[in-house]
Every structure is written in C-alpha cells, then in structure tokens.
Image (spheres, coloured by chain):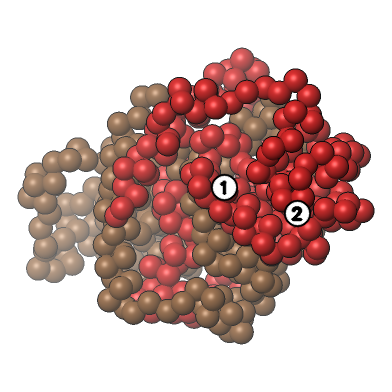
Chain colours: A brown, B red
Amino acid sequence: LLRDTRASSARVFIAPSVPEAVVDAEIVQECIAETLGAKREIFALLDQLTPPTTVLASSTSAIQPSSFTAELVGRARCLVAHPVNPPHLVPLVELCGAPWTAEECIERAHAIYASVGQVPIIVRREIEGFVLNRLQGALLSEALRLVGDGIVTPQDLDETVKNGLGLRWSFMGPLETIELNAPGGIADYCARYGGFYRRVASDPPSPKVWDQDMVTRVTTAWGRRSEQVLKDRGAWRDQRLAALRAHLWEHRQE
Amino acid sequence: LLRDTRASSARVFIAPSVPEAVVDAEIVQECIAETLGAKREIFALLDQLTPPTTVLASSTSAIQPSSFTAELVGRARCLVAHPVNPPHLVPLVELCGAPWTAEECIERAHAIYASVGQVPIIVRREIEGFVLNRLQGALLSEALRLVGDGIVTPQDLDETVKNGLGLRWSFMGPLETIELNAPGGIADYCARYGGFYRRVASDPPSPKVWDQDMVTRVTTAWGRRSEQVLKDRGAWRDQRLAALRAHLWEHRQE
C-alpha cells in the first residue's frame, strides 16, 4: 500500500463538479478555505448532494464542527477529520464530532482512515486546537519564553528536541516515555517527579510570548532564510519524513 | 566511533578509588546520588583532587550548579552537564554553569562532548529543569489535562505524538518545524497562528493535573503493566533508539 504510488495515482481523478465528485462517495474529505462561511456553505451543499450514508468530514484545524453543521438534516454524519501536513507522510488524523455526531459515524470514519494506513485518533469533545495543536502550543510557548528570555539560543532549543525529546517521541508517545522512566510506571514517575513538574506548571509562559517583540527577538537570533531556501528545505523535510516512515515501517513488528 | 563498541569498552576501566579515577582527568562526569549534600561533598573532594585545568561536570537534572560550587577554590571550572537517559543512545547534553563558571570552561566542555559524538547545548542562566525537562513538562501537563478531562484517551494521546508531532521533531526542532509551515518563515507563522496559540497559552493546565486523583484517572485508563513487562519494553525502547540513531546517521548529510 505504502509503495505502490503508480496504482494509487491511477485511482485519483479530478471531477468536473462538486456533485460529480461526491455522488457515490463513502466519505467526503472537505479541504476548502478555512472560514466559517465557506464551511457552512459547502456542508449544506454536501448534505443535499450525498446519500445519507456518506460520511462528511472537514479538514479544518481551527473551526469546531458544531459551528457549521447544526442546521443540517444529516448533521449526525458530519465531523472534523483534521490531517497533519503533509498528510501523505504524517499519518495522524484527529476525528472530532459535534455533540450530535453519531458514534457510528465516528467509528466508520475511524475504520476508513485506518484502512488506508492513516492513524485516526478520537477527540471526544470539541476543544480549540483539538489535541495535536494544543500539545504543540504548550511546547512552543515554553520554547519562545526560553529563547526570548535569553536562556537558550533558538538553534540550541531545536537541538534539545531533535537530539533529546524527539527521538523517543517518534516511535513512543510521551506517556509511554515516562512509564519506562520509573520502575513502577506512570504512577511511580509522577510520584518521583510530580513536584518538579508542578512547580514548572505553576509558572507557565505568558500569552505575551506570542507578541511581536518576543517573536522578533527569536527570529533575529534565528536568522532569516529566503522563501526559496525555505521551499528547498521543505522538500528536504518531506524526503526525510518519507525515509523515517520507511524506517518505522521496517521496525513495526518489534 | 559509533560502531566500534569493542574498542570503546576496552578504554573503560573501574578505578579502585576516587583519587585514582580523577587524578589525570581532562573532565570528570559526576553521577552520584541526586542530593545537595552528596553533590557538595563530592565537588569539594574533586576540587582538591584534580589539577586546576580539569573540568568538573555534574550529571544532575534538578540541582543548580551555584548551590554546590559556591565555596570552592576552583568554582570557575564547575558546571552541570545534564545527559539524557539512556546517554549512549540519546546524544543531548545540557551544559549549565553557575554565575562564576568561566566561559572558557563551558567552551571546553562543549568541545569535549561534541568530540565524542554527543550534542551539547548551553543553558545560559540557571533555571529549574534546564531546557529539556521544562519543554517535556509543558507538553506533559497539557497531556495530563487533556486525558484527565476525558478529551482523549491516553493511548490516543500517545498516537498523536508518535504519528504526528514526534516524526518531524526527531530530525528537526520545533522552531524549524514552524519555519517551514508558513511561506515567510517563523515570523509569518506567528502572524498567522499566534492568535490561536495566545488563546491556548491564556488557559494553561493547572499544576493540579499532577495531583494524585488526576494521575490515577490517567493510569486507570492507561492500564497497569508489571515491572517485568516494563523492563522488557525498556530493552525494546533501547533497541529502537539504536536503530533510529543509525537511520539518522545514514541520512546526516542530507
């Protein structure tokens, strides 16, 4: 499945219109403009155009499903299925229903994403940022604070993750990581180190770390790269992600 | 260097006493009990036993260097060099001096760790948890909040990192990650998404996520594994880390 790119490409076609694209669909993955108005309009259309068994999934990373599905006859089959960029290389998909989304719809979406090699997870209540971007935000805010306060250079901050925390996190989650860092597992780890983490949590970074002056301090220390350099580096990233996925796939049985 | 384990082992010997271990050392890596009293005692001893050019480095993850080096004649050559477990597989070393640590001492330590294939970074002022554990703490506190509040299962939380955020973070840092996620780099990314991250930062997890009842909710949902299973899984983790390091080494030129 992962390697047969020619066969995969042959199954893709561009439909000349929305009705033709969705008429027989098992699932629709909506990826249009990231505005509430656009989502409302397209979901109303999709609800009319598709059979009632079609799952209607939005790629939105920032808009809650209840805000654009409330009025629809078929609202029970609507959800958010938030992929991660680039989705052909990062398998996670966050599934989040509105309060009226049918459990069975979420289960069907889960099965469909899993069957094509993605890794779906379920966000059980609507929450801004879902799970991934909240976790990313928690780490980024602390990172900006540490760099902005002059504790560490942005280059060394990045080294700390890629040569420290990020190694385990690419094949284990943060909870299994701490489970294996104390003989008695997670509860033992929290008993040993909870005091420290509680003190860190009692002094969280201010939202002001995202203000212009703090960001400027970070970008000045980081240095500026041209759009072309960033584009080339983005292609490098994708190659590295593909190689890493292949590596992880080889070791999947262990 | 990375593969010649026999030659490396042959260079290791166990000295019969502390004076014999350190008398000719270029650098001493102290790894004794994690208490302030023990650190004070051993550093006083090391300062007497070693020539003034020896770098004296503590492995402590939690004790600030100024708290156990202030009274020493050779305090300018003392610092913390905090490795990450397991240090033969995770290369990061956090270097943190006291206010009186000589810049030249930190530079020498930096050069020594880099020369043996570790990745040293510099923590420029004393701060609890240094950099790595503060970043880990920020992410863990948000993770415990999301799981404890029933937003996501602990299993799905771990999937979110290992199949989402952790892939890029194993070969790029979080700052380069965001730099490549907006055409104009970090400043552009912060302009686009800073509003969201500011809202997330304005609602940080409470230190109470580390309280017993929250931790119990997480461990109940996670399930308990015996010490033997955790030990086996720890050996698996080390094998996976070794394989990942080999993979990253192969791709180091890209």
> How many numbered marks have been drawn onto this rendered protein structure?
2
Decide: few, some or many residues near mark 1? Use Cα within 10 Å; few <14, some 14-19, many ≥20: some
For mark 2, name the chain: B
Side of A140 where B75 appears, left or right: right
Write the residue at 67% across / 43% down: B27
Indicate the quadrant containing the C terminus of chain B: top left, top right, bottom left or bottom right.
bottom left
Relative vertical location of residue A154 with respect to residue B32 in this rendering, above or below: below
Label 1 sits on what residue type? Tyr
Left/right placement of residue A7 relative to residue B244 reads left
Location of the N terminus of chain B (image quadrant): top left
Q: Which mark is residue B77?
A: 2
- Give the camera-side residue of A121 and A224: A224
- Residue type beneath disc 2: Arg
Q: Please, which chain is the residue tagged with disc 1 on? A: B
Mark found first going from the N terminus, 1 or 2: 2
Q: Residues within 10 Å of mark 2 (few under 14, many from 20)?
A: many
Q: Secondary structure at mark 2?
A: helix
* In this view, B203 is above or below B67: below
Residue labelled with disc 1: B113
Q: Nearer the viewer, residue A236 or A184?
A: A236
**Relative image position of residue B98 (x, y in whole percent):** 79, 59
Residue A137 is labelled as none
Along the viewing direction, whichever of A107 and B163 lies nearer the viewer: B163
Marks 1/2: CA distance? 15 Å
Q: Does residue B106 appear to the left or right of A46 in the view shown? A: right
- In the orientation shown, which residue stands out farthest toward the top? B228
Furthest residue to the bottom?
A213
Name which residue lies at 13% across and 69% down: A17
Quadrant in the picture for residue A13: bottom left
Give me the residue at 75% from left, 54% from top.
Answer: B77
Residue A38: tell me if it is visible: no
